[in-house]
Image: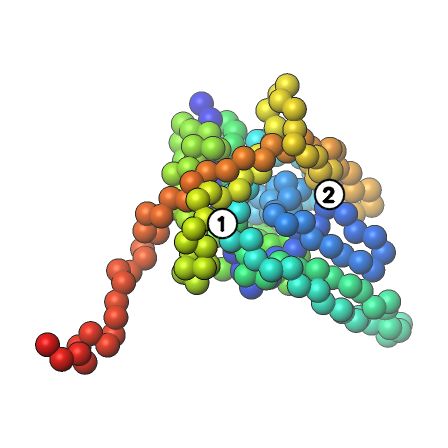
Amino acid sequence: MTSVLLLRLAGPLQAWGSAARFARRTTENAPTKSGVLGLLAAAQGRERDADLSDLAALRFGVRIDQPGTRVRDFQTAHHADSGKSMPLSERFYLADAVFVAGVEGDSSFIEALHTAVRAPACLPYLGRRSCPPVEPFDLGVRPDTHLMQAFREEPWHASEWHRARTRSRRTLDVLLDSAHGEAPHLSLRDTPVSFDPRHRRYELRGITTTSVEPNSAPLPGTPPPHDPTTALRKS
């Protein structure tokens, strides 16, 4: 039996790099598999050189609820020992983005990952340590289902201002690991083999692009609409 663990990835800034060259640090337009699996591995307290084959075997997907805006930042740093200035680095981020990420796999393993997410050994961050998530982060486990069904049923997590600006939008983009034998629409080298800083290794991943209709059901715990000026109006 398979289950799906869903995470809401939202915060002021996110950065999901699949490649970095010298002082230029880019970001993809959506969370990478390596970034989210790294988050889960850290939550479990795995060492950097730990085996990742069980995590890499999970089917991964992302629903883009709010694409956000790409921003560029220039950063300076000084060497901790010598105090000398390090090269100026150019870093890219996604601002005000909201994603629903999911992993699908054996139910017992998914439950173990959910337990780690609820009491993480290392705090989660959105691609870089300077990018903490905002609540709600844990969206829970969907038992006996698959990724696409979970994405169809999960309410739309976009901000109200984004919903108002995109009233005419009929679908939300979804990026999924391509199924065995399926021709992928694009590919990305972001399936982690090792996070060992001495020799990080990633494999190529096929990605299928599709879409779902936004589920506009109220989010759990969302208060009903309230207009504070109602009591001031004349009857």
Residue 100 rendering spot, x and y as whole percentages: 50, 46
Is any part of residue 46 visible from this angle? no
Please rate how many residues cluster around mark 2, counting C-alpha atoms within 10 Å: few if below 14, some from 14 to 19, many from 20. Answer: some
Question: Which residue has dot 2 on it?
Answer: 195
The residue located at (53%, 47%) in the rendering is 64
Q: Amino acid at mark 1?
A: Asp
Mark 1 or mark 2, earlier in chain: 1
Total number of numbered labels?
2
Q: Nearer the viewer, mark 1 or mark 2?
A: 1
> What sort of colour scheme is used for the picture?
rainbow
Q: Which part of the image, by quadrant, shows the N terminus? A: top left
Residue 101 rendering spot, x and y as whole percentages: 53, 43
The residue located at (61%, 28%) in the rendering is 178
Secondary element under disc 1, as helix, strand or loop, is strand
Residue 157 rendering spot, x and y as whole percentages: 43, 52
**Pointer 1 with pointer 2, Cβ within 8 A:** no
Question: CA separation, marks 1 and 2?
Answer: 29 Å
Q: Tell which of 169 and 15 is nearer to you.
A: 169
Q: Tell which of 235 and 189 is nearer to you.
A: 235
The residue located at (72%, 46%) in the rendering is 18
Secondary element under disc 2, as helix, strand or loop, is loop
The residue located at (82%, 42%) in the rendering is 199
For residue 65, the mark is 1
Q: Is residue 74 above or below residue 201?
A: below
Q: Is residue 118 left or right of residue 74?
A: left
Q: Is residue 161 left or right of residue 70?
A: left
Q: Is residue 159 above or below residue 197?
A: below
Q: Amino acid at mark 2?
A: Phe
Is any part of residue 88 visible from this angle? yes
Q: Is residue 80 left or right of residue 144?
A: right
Residue 149 rendering spot, x and y as whole percentages: 43, 32
Residue closest to the far front: 168
